[in-house]
Amino acid sequence: MSSPRRQAAAAFAELADALDAADVDLPDAGNGWLITPAGAVLLQLRPLTLPEVGELIDALRRLADDT
């Protein structure tokens, strides 16, 4: 696995941990990810309800606060 792929996999694992720590119940939230030629990571999410979007936002904020 290339370095960008390892970094993306680690970031997605960190996001999954943040979701778990925030008690966000989003089974199969990510169907996968793709690294663009420019090096950006595209994360594919399944359709989310509005409450799930709010929970995801809270989890991302907690993750940002921890860094």
Image (cartoon, rainbow, N blue to C red):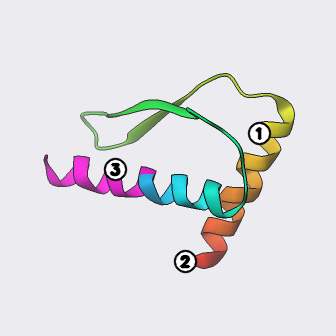
Please say if 29 is above or below 24: above
Numbered label attached to residue 67: 2
Q: Residue at x 55, y 32 (%)?
A: 28
- The Cα–Cα distance between marks 1 and 2, rounded to whole angstroms, is 21 Å
SS for callout 2: loop
Magenta-tinted stretch:
1-12
Mark 3 in CB contact with mark 2 (< 8 angstroms)? no
Q: Amino acid at mark 2?
A: Thr
- Residue bearing the label numbered 1: 53
Residue 17, picture quadrant: bottom right
Give the residue type that dot 1 points to.
Val
Q: Secondary structure at mark 1?
A: helix
Q: Earlier in the sequence, mark 1 or mark 2?
A: 1
Q: Residues within 10 Å of mark 2 (few under 14, many from 20)?
A: few
Residue tagged 3? 8
At label 3, counting other C-alpha atoms closer than 10 Å, the crowd grade (few under 14, some 14-19, many 20 or more) is many
Q: Secondary structure at mark 3?
A: helix
Quadrant holding the C terminus: bottom right
Name the residue rendered at 72%, 50% in the picture.
Answer: 24
